[in-house]
C-alpha cells in the first residue's frame, strides 16, 4: 500500500549505493495531469489553427465530404500529438516529458539508469491495459497497491518513476574553504581523530612522530616543539588542529 | 578529544568540500543535458563520481538528516545516471533491433507462433462451419448494414473509394489494425486468456464472414479484395498473439525469481516483435487503402503485392532484410 517515500537502492562500483526516492501516486498523478493538459492544448491548438487555415475563414467546421487534405493536415496530426505524446517524448527525452520535468520526477530503469528504447515502447504499449476501464483505473489501482507504485506498463518494462531532486540546494553553512586557510580536509580530520583516539595505545615516540608529520602537513606544532612536556604538547596541538573550525 | 569534537571536526572538514561538490554537480548537469561536449568534463566525471560517493558516505554518517546529505544524494544519483548512461544512437539501435533482436525473438517465440496460428485457423474454420450450417448466426459477427449489402449481392468494399479517400481509409485501417495487434499483445497480461479471446474472436469473424459471402457467391471478390493486404495482416495478428501468449505463459508458469520478474522479462523480450508488427501494419494499411479497394488493380497484381509483401515480412522477421547473414559471415 501507499506509505512514506520509499527509496530505490542501486548498487554502485564505489561501494556507496545510489538512493532514489520513488514517486508515489500523488506525484504520478500530478505529472500525468500536467502532461495531459499540455498534449490536449497542443493538439487542440493544432486543430484550431489547421482548421482556420484550411477553411480560410473563422470557422472550425469540417468539410461536408471526406477530404484527404483536411484529414492529413488537420485531424491526423492533432490525433498523433494527443496519442503519441508520451511515446515520442519519453523516447526523445530519455524517460522524461515536460509534465514529469515540471513535477520533478523522471523514469529510470531498475538499475537507476535511463530506460532503453525497448523498455519505453513497452511501457507505452501497456497504457492500453492501464487505461482500462476508464481514466487509468487499472493503472491507478496498481500504483496504489504495489510497493514501488508501479503501473502495469512499469512492471512490463522494468521502469519506475523517481523524484529528480533537481532543486536540492546546499545550506548556507556549507561553504567552500577560504583560499590558503590551511585547515584540515576530510582525510586529515579523520587521521587526526584516529590518532587522538589511539593516542594512549601508541608508544610515546611513535605518537609524537606521527603528530609531527600530521602537523607539518596541515600547519602548526611550533609551540609543541619548544614546550616542556612534549607528549602533552603534541596532543594539545592535535586537539587544537582538530577543533580549528 | 571526545566523540562530539571529533564529529564536529569531521563535519567541518566535510563541509569545506562544498565547492568541489558544486563544481562536480555543474559538470554532471552540463554532460547529462548534452550542453557540454568538453572532453575534460567527461574525463572529470569518473573522479567526480568517486568524490561524491566518498563524501556522501561521510554525510550519511555525520549529517544524516541534513540538506547537505540531500544535496549529495541528488548530485551522486545524477553522476551515477550520467556515468552509466549508454550511448544513444537511434540509428544503430534500430539496426540492431531489426537485424539481430527481432529475429532472435521470432526464433524464441516459434512454438507460440505455431500455437497462435493454429488457434486462429481453428477459430476461422469453426466460424465458417457455424455460419455455413446456421446462416442466421452471421448476426453475431457482422453489422446489419454489412449483412444487408451482401444479401443485395454486393460487397461492402465496392465503391469504398467513392465514399472515403484512400489516404483517410489507410489511416483509419492501420490505426484500427495496430490497436487490435497491440491489444492482442497486452491482453496476454490476463494470464494469456485475453490474447486467446482476441485471436479466437477474430478467427471466428473471418470464417463467419467468408461463409456468409460464399452463400451469396461473393467469396471470390472478397478473396480478391483481401489477398493484397490480408496475408501480412493476418500473419501479424498471429505474431502479436504469440507475443501476448508468451507474456501470459510467463505469468502462468514463471521461469524467473517471481511472477512479476518473469512477466517483465517476457514482456520486454516479446514486445520487440510488436515494433515490427506495427511497421508491417502501416504497410498493410496503405495497401488496404490504395490497392485493395481499387477496381483498376488486376487480380494478378494483387496476388503479386500480397505474396511480395509476405516475403518482405519473412525477410524482415529473419533479419535478412538488414544483412543478417552477411553480418554473421563477417
Image (tube, coloured by chain):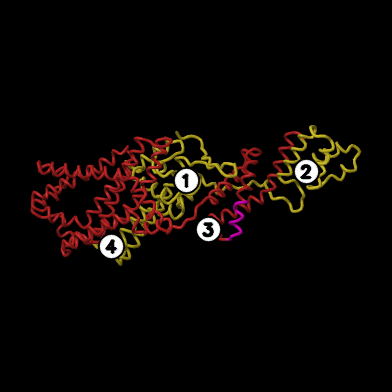
Chain colours: A yellow, B red
Give the labeled residue for mark 4: A70
Q: Position of residue A70 (x, y in %)?
A: 28, 62
Which residue, as the protein is rendered here, is positioned at the far top?
A201
- Dividing the picture into quarters, in which one does residue B242 lie? top left
**Disc 4 + disc 2, Cβ < 8 Å:** no
State the CA–CA distance, disc 4 to disc 2: 76 Å
Q: Chain of mark 3?
A: B
**Disc 4 + disc 3, Cβ < 8 Å:** no
B281 to the left or right of B14:
left
Asked whether B44 falls inside the magenta stretch, the response is: yes
The residue range painted magenta reads B38-47
Give the labeled residue for mark 1: A109
State the CA–CA distance, disc 1 to disc 3: 20 Å
Mark 2 or mark 1, earlier in chain: 1
Q: Position of residue A31 (x, y in %)?
A: 45, 47
A38 above or below B267? below
State the CA–CA distance, disc 2 to disc 1: 45 Å
Residue drawn where x is 59% and y is 42% of the image: A16
- Label 4 sits on a secondary structure element that is helix
Q: Chain of mark 2?
A: A
Q: Nearer the viewer, residue B89 or A86?
A: B89
Asked whether B58 falls inside the magenta stretch, the response is: no
Q: Nearer the viewer, residue B187 or A56?
A: B187
Amino acid at each position: 500500500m501507499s506509505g512514506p517515500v520509499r527509496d530505490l537502492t542501486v548498487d554502485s562500483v564505489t561501494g556507496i549505493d545510489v538512493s532514489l526516492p520513488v514517486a508515489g501516486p500523488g506525484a504520478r498523478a500530478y505529472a500525468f495531469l500536467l502532461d495531459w493538459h499540455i498534449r490536449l492544448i497542443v493538439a487542440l491548438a493544432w486543430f484550431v489553427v489547421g482548421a482556420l487555415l484550411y477553411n480560410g475563414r473563422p470557422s472550425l467546421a469540417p468539410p461536408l465530404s471526406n477530404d484527404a487534405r483536411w484529414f492529413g493536415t488537420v485531424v491526423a496530426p492533432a490525433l498523433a500529438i494527443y496519442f503519441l505524446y508520451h511515446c515520442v517524448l519519453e523516447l526523445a527525452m530519455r524517460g522524461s516529458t515536460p509534465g514529469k520535468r515540471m513535477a520533478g520526477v523522471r523514469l529510470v530503469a531498475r538499475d537507476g539508469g535511463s530506460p532503453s528504447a525497448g523498455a519505453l515502447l513497452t511501457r507505452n504499449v501497456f497504457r492500453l491495459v492501464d487505461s482500462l476501464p476508464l481514466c487509468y483505473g487499472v493503472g491507478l489501482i496498481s500504483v496504489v497497491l504495489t510497493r514501488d507504485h508501479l503501473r502495469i506498463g512499469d512492471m512490463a518494462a522494468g521502469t519506475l518513476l523517481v523524484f529528480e531532486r533537481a532543486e536540492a540546494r546546499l545550506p548556507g553553512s556549507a561553504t567552500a574553504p577560504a583560499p590558503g586557510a590551511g585547515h584540515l580536509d576530510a582525510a586529515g580530520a579523520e587521521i587526526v581523530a584516529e590518532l587522538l583516539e589511539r593516542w594512549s595505545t601508541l608508544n610515546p615516540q611513535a605518537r609524537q612522530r606521527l603528530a609531527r608529520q600530521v602537523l607539518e602537513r596541515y600547519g602548526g606544532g611550533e609551540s609543541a616543539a619548544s614546550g616542556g612536556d612534549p607528549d602533552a604538547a603534541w596532543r594539545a596541538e592535535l586537539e587544537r588542529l582538530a577543533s580549528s573550525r | 578529544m571526545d566523540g562530539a569534537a571529533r564529529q564536529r571536526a569531521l563535519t567541518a572538514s566535510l563541509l569545506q568540500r562544498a565547492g568541489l561538490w558544486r563544481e562536480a554537480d555543474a559538470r554532471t548537469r552540463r554532460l547529462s543535458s548534452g550542453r557540454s561536449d568538453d572532453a575534460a568534463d567527461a574525463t572529470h566525471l569518473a573522479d567526480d563520481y568517486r568524490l561524491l560517493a566518498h563524501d556522501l558516505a561521510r554525510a550519511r554518517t555525520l549529517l544524516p538528516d541534513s540538506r547537505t546529505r540531500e544535496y549529495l544524494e541528488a548530485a551522486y544519483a545524477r553522476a551515477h545516471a550520467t556515468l552509466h548512461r549508454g550511448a544513444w544512437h537511434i540509428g544503430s539501435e534500430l539496426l540492431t533491433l531489426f537485424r539481430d533482436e527481432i529475429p532472435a525473438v521470432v526464433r524464441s517465440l516459434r512454438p507460440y507462433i505455431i500455437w497462435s496460428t493454429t488457434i486462429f485457423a481453428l477459430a476461422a474454420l469453426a466460424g465458417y462451419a457455424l455460419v455455413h450450417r446456421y446462416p442466421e448466426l452471421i448476426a453475431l459477427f457482422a453489422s446489419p448494414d454489412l449483412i444487408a449489402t451482401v444479401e443485395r449481392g454486393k460487397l461492402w468494399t465496392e465503391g469504398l473509394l467513392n465514399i472515403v479517400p484512400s489516404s483517410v481509409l489507410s489511416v483509419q485501417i492501420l490505426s484500427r489494425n495496430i490497436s487490435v495487434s497491440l491489444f492482442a499483445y497486452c491482453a496476454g497480461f490476463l494470464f494469456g486468456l485475453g490474447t486467446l479471446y482476441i485471436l479466437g474472436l477474430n478467427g471466428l469473424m473471418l470464417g463467419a464472414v467468408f461463409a456468409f459471402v460464399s452463400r451469396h457467391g461473393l467469396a471470390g471478390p472478397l478473396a480478391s479484395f483481401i489477398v493484397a493486404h490480408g496475408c501480412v495482416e493476418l500473419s501479424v495478428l498471429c505474431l502479436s498473439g504469440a507475443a501476448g501468449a508468451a507474456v501470459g505463459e510467463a505469468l502462468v508458469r514463471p521461469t524467473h525469481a517471481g511472477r512479476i520478474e518473469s512477466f517483465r522479462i517476457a514482456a520486454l523480450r516479446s514486445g520487440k516483435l510488436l515494433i515490427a508488427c506495427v511497421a508491417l501494419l502501416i504497410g498493410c494499411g496503405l495497401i488496404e487503402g490504395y490497392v485493395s479497394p481499387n477496381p483498376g488493380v488486376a487480380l494478378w497484381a494483387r496476388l503479386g503485392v500480397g505474396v511480395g509483401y509476405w516475403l518482405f515480412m519473412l525477410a524482415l522477421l529473419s533479419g535478412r532484410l538488414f544483412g543478417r547473414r552477411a553480418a554473421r559471415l563477417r
